[in-house]
Image: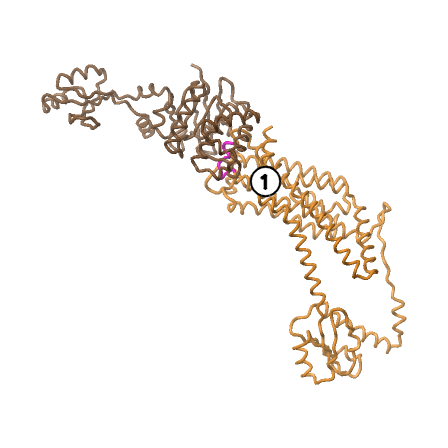
Chain colours: A orange, B brown
Amino acid sequence: MSLSLIIKREFNSKVRNKSFIVMTFLSPLLIVAMGALVAYLAGVNKDVVNKIAIYDTADLLKDDFKDNANTKYVDLSAMPLEEAKKIASEDYAGLIYIPVTDSITQLADSKIEYLSNDTPNLEFVSTIEKVANEKITKYKLKQLGFDYDKIEEAKTRSKIYLSKFSGEETHKEGSIIKIIIGGLFGYLIMMFVIIYGNMVMRSVIEEKTNRIIEIIISSVKPFQLMMGKIIGTSMAGILQFIIWTILGLGLFTILSSVFNVEMGATAQTEEVAQSMEGIQLYISELWKLPLMTMFISFIIYFIGGYFLYSSLYAAIGAAVDSETDSQQFLLPIIMPLMLGVYVGFFTVISDPNGTVATVFSMIPLTSPIVMMMRIPFGVPLWEVIVSMVILFATFFGVVWFAAKIYRIGILMYGKKPTYKELFKWLKY
Amino acid sequence: MEYILEVNNVVKQYGDYTALNNVSLKVPKGSIYGLLGPNGAGKTSLIRIINQITMPDSGEILLDGEKLSPDHIGHIGYMPEERGLYKSMKVGEQALYLAQLKGLSKTEAKKQLEYWFEKLEIKGWWNKKIQELSKGMAQKIQFVVTVLHQPKLLIFDEPFSGFDPVNANLIKDEILELRDKGATIIFSTHRMESVEELCDDIALIHKSNKLIEGKINDVKREYRTNTFEVGIVPFNLQGFLANIATTEYKSEKTDFKTLDDELKLSITLPQAGTSSQLLKYLMEHGNVTYFVEKIPSVNDIFIKTVSQI
């Protein structure tokens, strides 16, 4: 009875908060707007054409540099080098200087230079290298009596087809999808824990500084108040996520239809067909994932992880008098969360069933994140169950521990407690 | 006599610190009971235990003869010294929430709330947020919230601090009315004027121990010194002063307010002496203009007891 009252109040006070409303409706717009801005800015860069000067008096390579949409090569070999350099430094992005040698083979041992005012991007440098290398290789092969075209013909591009023993076919794209989906879920859990854990903590501190806490706990048990707070806040958070998802999907649909129209009007049909095929491949890979398992385990890990951490947040809120005092206690909470994400991104991707990934998907403080990242790659059911059992066993332990600190902390005013004092409270 | 609250041998320790050392109290039904003690004496610890905010390490508490349990929460109303309400919550909504936490149904809570808002003339505040109210206004809400669920036992920790005299009087009258309707009130305070004025019973707690408990008059009787303040116009001033020095009466010059300029003495009776004997003696030596027993104030008792230890 009183628990549901507390949940309702917490939920209402969060949801009616102005900043909550603003954040809920503005964030998806901001994210989409940022994405659009980035896409636009990237597009702006693409239209710029870089003029590159070539100085190649011996006429060794200059015909091999082909103009494309972003670069235009201009031959300045006719004028003296000094003048060419001067002009290039003023009007051109850079100057490729090819030394005079007797033959193309000797070019390999001499210094081809690229002069520019600012450091060129790596991609462009490797383009120059590639052009030079190809030409020299071709020339050498010819000298040795090979027919270059035949060699080209003989080159094989084989493709490995991936499939499971159970018979399903998979693709390389599948792994990418798995990384993205797993990462997304893990990241989502971390973000939710941090954002709403903090909200729980703030609300505990608010009650403490408002001094209403004493009135409330003369009516309900501190444990009920703590749980009501955690549940109420999580419900507000879930509502926010649902709104975000709906808004996000809506905006995405609108934007993609707008972009599709634009693309249909300008782009070449071949490219569109290719990208459509790619998208279809991704989608079919997506459907092959254990979606139901993922969804169910997401819910379970989400609840377990969120409750585990937010009860710690509540305990911290109870122990301190103001948010600034909470920093030193927050570090030990943030650390395992970050660790989970990093371990997830670095070890799960390279070896989803390796020792490190397995161990971290069992440790309760990191398991919600790491296991969620592993599940798309296929994890034995027993491992998932063991990890969940450990998570919930720890959850009850931590809630007991947090409730003890909470119970004492909310009535303690004044000085910031040390870890030693917190430990002493457990014995009260 | 019937007791609404019995505290039996309660001990509470925080680590090495003993907050309550074997404290026992009996609060008579329908009384106003003053729980006195200097800061840090253990009053708040005791009140928190009565409110079941914390549990005693040992000892038991009986409310209306029954062992205190979570079912009793609705029978107790508590106004802590540090007042507090949700700042950004509306007054009406907040009061309803707190009343419902005490076990009232929503309709019942609403009915009570309307009654009190009418009574204290604060009807227009229903949809205001606490942060829009002045401190005194918020205190009124705090009082309403405390009494809304019609508790049998009301506990006020320093109830008049923060009220202006007009509102303090208003609240005092409300408290007396609640008492007349059958509620029992516990005051925790170190402001002695209000104790003298309102309390029927008092208990003094100091350094985790209960030192005094009883009807306020019984306590005063116990602490009376049989000292009288006397105003006299002697027939012969020097003779009288010389004479009284030879008697068993201990006298010293003192000062109190009268209209005339007589000799003012404070005279303590000997062990077996009575007031009429003293009066007779005085009348033999002059015109007695003033004769009052010096009754110890609660403040005197408080200071005397506390400074002894």
The residue located at (36%, 32%) in the rendering is: B165
Please check the rendered image and state whether residue B284 is part of the magenta-colored stretch, yes or no. Answer: no
Residue at image mark 1: A16
Which x, y percent locates residue B7?
45, 22
Q: In the rendered view, tell whether residue A392 sits above or below residue A133.
A: above
Camera-nearest residue between A215 and A51: A51
State the quadrant of the N terminus of chain B.
Answer: top left
| A290 left or right, relative to A423 | right
Picture layout, residue A90 above or below residue A349: below
Image point 87% across, 64% down: which residue? Answer: A156
Q: Mark 1 falls within which chain?
A: A
Q: Is residue A214 magenta?
A: yes
Position of B199 with respect to A144 (left or right) is: left
- The answer to whether one can see residue B285 in this image is yes
Please determine whether, in this image, residue B67 is positioned above or below residue A329: above
Q: Amino acid at mark 1?
A: Arg
Q: Quadrant of residue A386?
A: top right
Residue A340 horizontal/vertical position (percent):
66, 48
State whether residue A355 appears in this view.
Answer: no
Q: Nearer the viewer, residue A120 or A361?
A: A120
Residue A53 picture location, percent across and down: 72, 77
Q: Which residues are magenta?
A: A207-215
Residue found at x 77% / y 56%: A261
Please identify the dominant SS of the magenta region. helix
- Residue A404: x and y in percent read 55, 35
